[in-house]
Image (cartoon, helix red, strand yellow):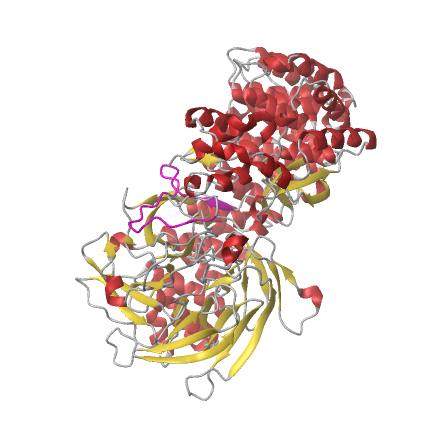
């Protein structure tokens, strides 16, 4: 949970807590048609963080009274509304002595509770309202910071239970199982079956809460990123061992606002670097699935911001296979309070279709870990931990009608409940049928799946049949032709690994809805059928410029790459001449797969597509194929230039003509910057001498950025000490962007690094120009003598004792800074990794809100950036089997690949099969030694700029 705080918050001390009635008076709902009502408060609940209703209408409340640091006293409370008036008048302690419980979900007549290191099952077997059965379902979760633990239990549409990682990782194992069955959770959420203990990691890495929508789509969150979308499962990407891609989660927040919040409460005191004008303590999101607020709210995302006392609403607009989450209100919030102790930490749809808000109600939600040590003893972190409120938001024009208790419902009644308009009712009915293994429901479920009156009722019937093992191909084939796009999308997902549905999936490739085609592409990738490659080619031809559909297609090309490419080029011959960016990606990525496979017959077939015809004025598609082929061959340990040495008899003679065209394209004023950049990459791999002659001029001002970037990367490809020397001789002429990328290239091999270190020793290049990742790469050079020179330079430029440096520069705090000059220094030295008020690159923490930090704290942050490295912003070093050294933040990883993110958000994907070593550096991307470049006045100016609100 930065759930509870986002890692940094504390409102100014209040004299006393408000009563529930007084607090309610501070609320401001954006919609005058809505009302907010109290359903429970202290002493019936205390420190609530999560709630869930069982099939009998009993409300279970996870209470983290022991937050933030114990002693262990967490409880699970059970509330009942016996007179059904909407207020819960009966409160019992269902279980106590729990270790920071933070998630709850009904299951099998009891409840599952997350309480790291365990997920527990609690059940009352004798009917006294107290759990007499307590057993561990899964264990192995890291306990760590109490804000950052396993949480977010959610019933999945696929009949699995999903949970959020919480950022503490660990492993999941059923007690008693052998250690080899342990499932590592590193940077992943997961799903499990409570009855069998089966566990699988899933895409996404959510902090507190893991909601889904009516169609089973998941939306992870982060303390500063209120909503993302898990678009494709990593197991889908991992099925293709030749695909170096790990993207599985989309950042869908509208870039137009970047996560702005508009609180009406007093500004809180903060201890971290994250902005309070933007999301800082995101937690407990939900997708509203009820029928009470009104149609305009259905499917909207609601997100808590506990630090600034508000709930924000986002509308999810379709964007291809994913969404854009835009603000519903431009400059106000759905719900806000003037009370700084209103702490919304969780949201959910209730049995009556209303929206429920869990209010932790605390003076302080900060965790001691994020408070300076010298201040901790003076803060009473658990003050008011005996308080807490639960609120219901409904529509004044709609009378609430709770879903009838389903615990004693008949099979027919449960099947009928699958068509209820409220998502809670549908989920509960589905769960009960599956839990009971109620085979008698199968005939009625088939009828509902094929002829139900509502799309959601039909797909719930399908999901329930699947959970019972009663989903037949005949039923699913009919559902794949449903009139509802949402039903067809879900049916295509379920059709994977069903060869009997081959014809229906091939037909789905031409579905008018992109989400259906996306799911069909995934299923077709697993289909062992001769029609599958052509069907995938039709999807690629239509959706090449949709990043996610393109990825879905490529993920299934492990054994289908050549038949797919052949079918695509037969249908789209024009792609060989000119392509859109997405079409070029399809061609290069497919060729890379073929190169990595390194099958002689496939390489010859591909080579036949590379010879340009005399009448072609452009050859962008052919060049994209050859660039991709060279990537793939390099991964297979067979560089393209070695293949070309085989001579004309090998069948690759046409490539020479294509390289001639590429060389002309580089110098052509008529060629697009993208075509020139790709041509240069190709030339660097096949004719390095020719590329070396062109590169120095292409790095200079006046060239397109994409060309400059390609030229910098080509320096590493050519790997020429002579070229490095030429570039370093003209160092003063290079623009800043080119310098940064060239420096990274010069650290990639011993030959180039030797020239770079020499330039630093000769004061041609300033050591302050090197990013931390570049410094780390130099430290790892395999040449011992060169390594010694590097360490000597680094020790002289940035003393190891950063505490002494901070002390030495304390006079900065007495200087008057110029914010204008500070802004220029920020743009030059910081903006490549930090955003501030929408400017810059969001690689490290957003600095929009650091104005509230004391100047002394900002000075320490600048001078000693590695004093307290968050795992989220620690760099990793990758050494490849080809001898390359790569570095950056670990952005994503799958079983087959990982992605590093560096300055300016530049990303590099690497197959795990290419990696020799992967090491955490323990450092951030921010360099030590900035004081050498800025001096005392420059530091004062930079701090003045950062202090501007």
Q: Position of residue 568 (x, y in %)?
A: 54, 33
Q: Is residue 725 left or right of residue 548?
A: right
Q: Residue at x 43, y 44 (%)?
A: 321
Q: Position of residue 313 (x, y in %)?
A: 32, 50
Query: Any magenta on residue 267?
Result: yes
Q: Is residue 424 magenta?
A: no
Q: Give the camera-side residue of 791 and 154.
A: 791
Q: Is residue 788 visible?
A: yes
- Say above or below: 25 vs 106: above
The residue lying at 54 percent from left, 43 percent from top is: 247
Q: Quadrant of the C terminus?
A: top left
Q: For the magenta stretch, what is the residue range?
A: 249-271
Q: Is residue 165 above or below residue 720?
A: below
Taken as a whole, is the magenta stretch helix, strand or loop? loop
Above or below for 3 versus 50: above
Q: From what the image shows, is residue 921 above or below residue 621?
A: below
Q: Position of residue 663 (x, y in %)?
A: 63, 14
Viewer-side residue, 254 vs 101? 101
Task: Tell me if 695 is positioned left or right of 192 in this view.
Answer: right
Question: Image quadrant of residue 398?
Answer: bottom left
**Depth check, front residue: 203 or 426:** 203
| Residue drawn 48% across the image and 30% down it | 815
């Amino acid at each position: 949970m930065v759930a509870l705080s986002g890692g940094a918050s504390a409102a100014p001390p209040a004299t006393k807590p408000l009563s529930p009635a007084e607090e309610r008076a501070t609320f401001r709902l954006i919609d005058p048609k809505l009302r907010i009502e109290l359903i429970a408060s202290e002493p019936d609940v205390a420190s609530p963080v999560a709630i869930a209703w069982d099939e009998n209408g009993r409300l279970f409340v996870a209470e983290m009274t022991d937050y933030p640091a114990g002693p262990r006293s967490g409880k699970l409370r059970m509330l009942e509304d016996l007179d059904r008036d909407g207020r819960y008048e009966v409160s019992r302690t269902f279980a106590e002595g729990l270790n920071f419980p933070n998630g709850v979900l009904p299951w099998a007549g009891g409840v599952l509770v997350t309480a790291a290191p365990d997920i527990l099952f609690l059940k009352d077997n004798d009917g006294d309202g107290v759990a007499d059965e307590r057993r561990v379902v899964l264990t192995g979760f890291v306990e760590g910071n109490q804000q950052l633990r396993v949480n977010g239990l959610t019933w999945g549409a696929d009949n699995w239970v999903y949970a959020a990682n919480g950022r503490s990782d660990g492993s999941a194992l059923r007690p008693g199982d052998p250690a080899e069955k342990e499932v590592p959770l590193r940077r992943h959420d997961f799903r499990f079956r409570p009855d069998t203990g089966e566990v699988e990691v899933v895409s996404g890495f959510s902090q507190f809460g893991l909601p889904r929508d009516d169609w089973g789509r998941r939306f992870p969150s982060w303390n500063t990123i209120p909503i993302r979308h898990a678009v494709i499962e990593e197991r889908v990407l991992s099925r293709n061992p030749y695909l170096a891609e790990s993207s599985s989660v989309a950042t869908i927040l509208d870039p137009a606002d970047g996560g702005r919040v508009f609180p009406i409460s007093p500004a809180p005191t903060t201890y971290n670097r994250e902005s309070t004008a933007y999301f800082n303590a995101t937690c407990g999101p939900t997708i509203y699935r009820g029928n009470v607020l009104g149609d305009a709210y259905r499917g909207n995302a609601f997100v808590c911001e506990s630090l600034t006392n508000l709930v924000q609403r986002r509308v999810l607009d379709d964007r291809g296979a994913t969404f854009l989450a835009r603000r519903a209100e431009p400059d106000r919030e759905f719900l806000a309070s003037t009370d700084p102790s209103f702490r919304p930490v969780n949201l959910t749809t209730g049995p009556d279709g209303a929206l429920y808000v869990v209010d932790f109600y605390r003076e302080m939600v900060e965790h001691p870990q994020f408070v300076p040590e010298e201040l901790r003893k003076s803060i009473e972190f658990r003050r008011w931990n005996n308080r807490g409120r639960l609120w219901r938001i409904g529509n004044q024009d709609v009378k609430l009608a709770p879903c009838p208790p389903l615990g004693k419902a008949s099979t027919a009644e449960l099947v009928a409940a699958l068509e209820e308009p409220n998502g809670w009712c549908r989920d509960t009915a589905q769960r009960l049928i599956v839990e009971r293994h109620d085979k008698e429901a199968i005939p009625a479920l088939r009828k509902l799946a094929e002829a139900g009156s509502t799309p959601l009722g039909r797909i719930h019937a399908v999901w329930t049949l699947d959970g019972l093992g009663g989903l037949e191909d005949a039923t699913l084939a009919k559902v794949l032709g449903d009139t509802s796009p949402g039903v067809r999308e879900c049916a295509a997902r379920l059709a994977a690994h069903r060869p009997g549905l081959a014809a229906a999936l091939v037909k789905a490739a031409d579905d008018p809805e992109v989400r259906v085609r996306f799911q069909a592409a995934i299923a077709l990738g697993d289909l062992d059928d001769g029609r599958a490659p052509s069907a995938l080619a039709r999807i690629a031809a239509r959706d090449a410029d949709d990043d996610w559909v393109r990825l879905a297609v490529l993920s299934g090309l492990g054994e289908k790459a050549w038949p797919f490419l052949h079918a695509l080029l037969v249908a789209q011959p024009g792609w060989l001449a000119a392509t859109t960016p997405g079409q070029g990606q399809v061609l290069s990525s497919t060729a890379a797969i073929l190169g990595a496979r390194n099958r002689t017959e496939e390489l010859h077939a591909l080579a036949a597509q590379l010879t340009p015809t005399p009448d072609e004025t452009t050859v962008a598609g052919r060049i994209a194929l050859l660039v991709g082929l060279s990537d793939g061959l390099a991964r297979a340990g067979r560089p393209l230039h070695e293949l070309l040495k085989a001579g004309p008899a090998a069948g690759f003679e046409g490539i020479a003509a294509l390289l001639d065209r590429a060389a002309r394209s580089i110098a052509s004023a008529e060629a697009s910057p993208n075509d020139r950049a790709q041509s240069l990459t190709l030339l660097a791999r096949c004719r390095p001498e020719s590329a070396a002659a062109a590169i120095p001029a292409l790095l200079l001002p006046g060239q397109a950025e994409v060309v400059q970037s390609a030229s910098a990367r080509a320096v590493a490809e050519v790997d020429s000490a002579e070229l490095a020397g030429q570039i370093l001789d003209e160092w003063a002429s290079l623009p800043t962007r080119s310098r940064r990328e060239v420096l990274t290239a010069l650290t990639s091999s011993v030959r180039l690094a030797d020239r770079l270190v020499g330039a630093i020793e000769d004061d041609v290049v300033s050591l302050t120009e090197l990013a931390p990742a570049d410094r780390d790469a130099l430290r790892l050079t395999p040449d011992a003598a060169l390594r010694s020179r590097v360490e000597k330079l680094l020790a002289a430029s940035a003393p190891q004792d950063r505490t002494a440096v901070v002390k030495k520069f304390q006079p900065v705090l007495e200087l008057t800074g110029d914010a204008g000059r500070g802004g220029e220094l920020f743009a030059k030295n910081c903006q490549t990794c930090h955003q501030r008020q929408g400017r810059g690159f969001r690689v490290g923490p957003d600095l929009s809100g650091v104005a509230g930090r004391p100047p002394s704290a900002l000075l320490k942050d600048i001078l000693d950036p590695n004093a307290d490295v968050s795992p989220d912003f620690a760099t990793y070093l990758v050494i490849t089997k080809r001898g390359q050294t790569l570095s950056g933040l670990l952005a994503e990883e799958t079983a087959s690949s990982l992605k590093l993110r560096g300055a300016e958000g530049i990303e590099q994907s690497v197959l795990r099969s290419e990696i020799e070593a992967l090491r955490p550096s323990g450092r951030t991307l921010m360099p030590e030694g900035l004081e050498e470049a800025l001096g005392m006045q420059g530091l004062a100016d930079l701090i003045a700029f950062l202090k501007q609100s």
